[in-house]
Image: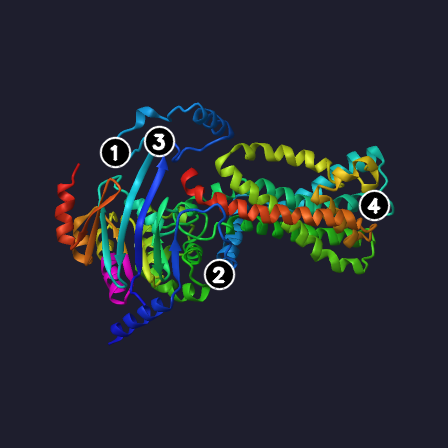
């Protein structure tokens, strides 16, 4: 059997300009229906680069292919709007691709944001249990990890306090602590090191390296060159929805600087 | 040594793991029942979460779940039972109407809440994978907890009015299940529709008010003119309400042909709803 953790074959993702992040109503639906029928182009003034095709579709990703071996730690680089987050969302199965095919072997734990699924009214302990279930972990496992998670996050004294009373830093630390203790086979992390607290950032980095040694496959998005260089064995560079470079972290970082826009 | 052991374990595990395929959306998305089962923990936790959060910062808390149908029963007993003098056979009007309000309130609460189930959980839907079908199920599950509480009060009322239960009480779970499937069926359609077309959130409370009068809650089935019976029985809540009354109060059994129509409609709405929801769910993240 061929060895891979993540295999991506020709993935593309298309968005309708103006259709993204706008709440639609029956009225706008009917309006668009009539507009389409008379052949008018939607938002013609918003055509701003080559990612937009003639029909007003925006390609956030175009024909992306790569394979990640089990146990690899791969960084994903790219400037704002390069398509990093969309790619992570597709691999996390939050959204589907428009074209292409991807295969994933193993349980994916993705952290597209620290503290996903936290409810402000619930206590730290309750939120840990809830997050564990969201990350597809059973009760006994989460209970066993509870002490380790709280110790890692440093919120021990606030375990019975509702999350809404936490500082944003505490919430982020707890979110990272949970994600890092799910024993992921594949871990997907977005913007991992925008952690303000540098001591905690270092602790996260150590933990990620430990997970990698234990065989987890890790895909990290970061704007920060240092962690990519220190942790990753390989880095991918996205630019305007295209995969433009795939190589050693140092080489990719050089390429990343030259792609500055 | 320990580390290489760990390394081996996770790699071994991975070799045994099934491969997850990620492909573009299809018109007909498959339903993975096994996966839904795997997420039953999350289903229960989300029900618990919403129950716990719902009565935060209220003074009487869960008493609201009891008060809501009781107040409605009081109003209906005075306005309809007393003023209009509707005859409900040998069953006292308050019990007669309350026994229908129990499944009815369940149904309408699920319907109204279903509009917001995806929007209220947008933080989850846009950031993590789980079978989205869980969310309408959570809404129905919360309704089921309220229904259980309301049912306890109903048994108190039955005892107070000295009504004797008969063997038909054994059929109660069947009609509760029917109420659940009806609510879930319509809830699936609404939860998927309201993400894209927020109009449904506005119109559903109105539809529910009209629907109330098209269901024998405040009046007995015998008042419905024969000419309207055909259209009337298209409403699956008729079967649920009549069935509940039969099971609990030993009322006249519901007409079998009517019951059959209700059951068929429930399953059409439910199965259609599941596939419609699966078809629409791929858009949630882009539309929210």
Q: Residue at x 16, y 54 (%)?
A: A249
Mark 1 vs mark 2: tell me if same chain: no
Label 1 environment density (alpha carbons within 10 Å; few <14, some 14–19, many ≥20): few
The magenta-colored residue range is A203-218
Do residues under tags 4 and 1 come within 8 Å of each other at their CB atoms?
Answer: no
The answer to whether residue B7 is left or right of residue B273 is left
Q: CA distance from mark 4 to mark 3?
A: 67 Å
Front tag of 1 and 2: 1
Residue B133 locus on image (x, y percent): 51, 50
Dot 2 or dot 4: first in sequence order is: 2
Residue B8 locus on image (x, y percent): 29, 72
Q: Which residue in the protein does label 2 denote?
A: B38
Q: Secondary structure at mark 1?
A: loop
Please give the chain letter of the residue carrying mark 3. A
Per the picture, the main secondary structure of the magenta-coloured stretch is: helix
Q: Which mark is residue B92?
A: 4
Mark 3 vs mark 2: tell me if same chain: no
Q: CA distance from mark 1 to mark 3?
A: 12 Å
């Amino acid at each position: 059997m061929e060895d891979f953790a993540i295999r991506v074959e020709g993935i593309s993702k298309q968005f309708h300009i103006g259709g993204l992040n706008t709440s639609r109503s029956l009225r706008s639906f009917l309006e668009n229906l009539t507009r389409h029928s008379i052949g008018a182009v939607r938002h013609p003034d918003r055509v701003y680069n080559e990612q937009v095709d003639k029909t007003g579709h925006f390609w956030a990703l175009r024909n992306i292919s790569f394979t990640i071996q089990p146990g690899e730690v791969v960084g994903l680089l790219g400037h704002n709007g390069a398509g990093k987050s969309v790619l992570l969302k597709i691999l996390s199965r939050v959204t589907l691709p428009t074209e292409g095919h991807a295969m994933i072997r193993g349980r994916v734990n993705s952290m597209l944001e620290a503290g996903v699924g936290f409810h402000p009214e619930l206590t730290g302990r309750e939120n840990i249990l809830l997050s564990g279930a969201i990350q597809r972990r059973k009760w006994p496992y989460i209970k066993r990890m509870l002490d380790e998670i709280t110790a890692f996050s440093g919120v021990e004294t606030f375990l019975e306090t509702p999350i809404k009373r936490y500082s944003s830093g505490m919430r982020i630390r707890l979110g990272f602590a949970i994600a890092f203790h799910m024993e992921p086979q594949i871990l997907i992390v977005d913007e991992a090191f925008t952690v303000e607290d540098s001591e905690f950032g270092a602790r996260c980095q150590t933990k990620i390296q430990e997970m990698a040694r234990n065989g987890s496959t890790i895909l990290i998005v970061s704007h920060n060159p240092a962690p990519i260089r220190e942790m990753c064995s390989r880095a991918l560079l996205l630019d305007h929805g295209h995969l433009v470079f795939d190589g050693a972290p140092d080489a990719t970082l050089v390429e990343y600087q030259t792609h500055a826009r | 040594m320990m580390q290489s052991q760990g390394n081996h374990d996770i790699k071994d595990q991975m070799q045994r793991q099934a491969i997850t395929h990620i492909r573009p959306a299809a018109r007909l998305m498959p339903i993975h029942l096994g996966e839904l089962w795997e997420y039953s923990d999350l289903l229960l936790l989300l029900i618990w979460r919403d129950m716990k959060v719902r009565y935060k910062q209220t003074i009487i808390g869960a008493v609201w779940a009891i008060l809501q149908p009781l107040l409605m029963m009081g109003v209906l007993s005075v306005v309809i039972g007393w003023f209009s003098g509707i005859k409900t056979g040998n069953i006292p009007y308050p019990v007669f109407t309350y026994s229908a309000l129990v499944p009815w309130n369940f149904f309408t609460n699920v319907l109204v809440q279903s509009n917001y189930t995806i929007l209220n959980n947008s933080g989850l839907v846009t950031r993590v994978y789980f079978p989205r079908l869980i969310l309408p199920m959570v809404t129905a599950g919360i309704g089921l907890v309220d229904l259980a509480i309301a049912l306890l009060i109903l048994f108190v009322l039955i005892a107070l009015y000295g009504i004797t239960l008969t063997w038909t009480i054994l059929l109660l779970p069947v009609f509760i299940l029917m109420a659940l499937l009806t609510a879930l069926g319509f809830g699936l359609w609404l939860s998927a529709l309201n993400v894209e077309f927020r109009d449904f959130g506005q119109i559903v409370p109105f539809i529910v008010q009209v629907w109330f009068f098209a269901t024998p809650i405040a009046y007995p089935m015998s008042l419905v003119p024969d000419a309207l019976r055909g259209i009337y029985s298209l409403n699956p809540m008729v079967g649920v309400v009549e069935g509940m009354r039969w099971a609990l109060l030993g009322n006249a059994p519901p007409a079998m042909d009517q019951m059959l129509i209700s059951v068929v409609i429930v399953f059409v709405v439910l199965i259609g709803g599941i596939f419609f929801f699966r078809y629409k769910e791929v858009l949630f993240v882009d539309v929210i």
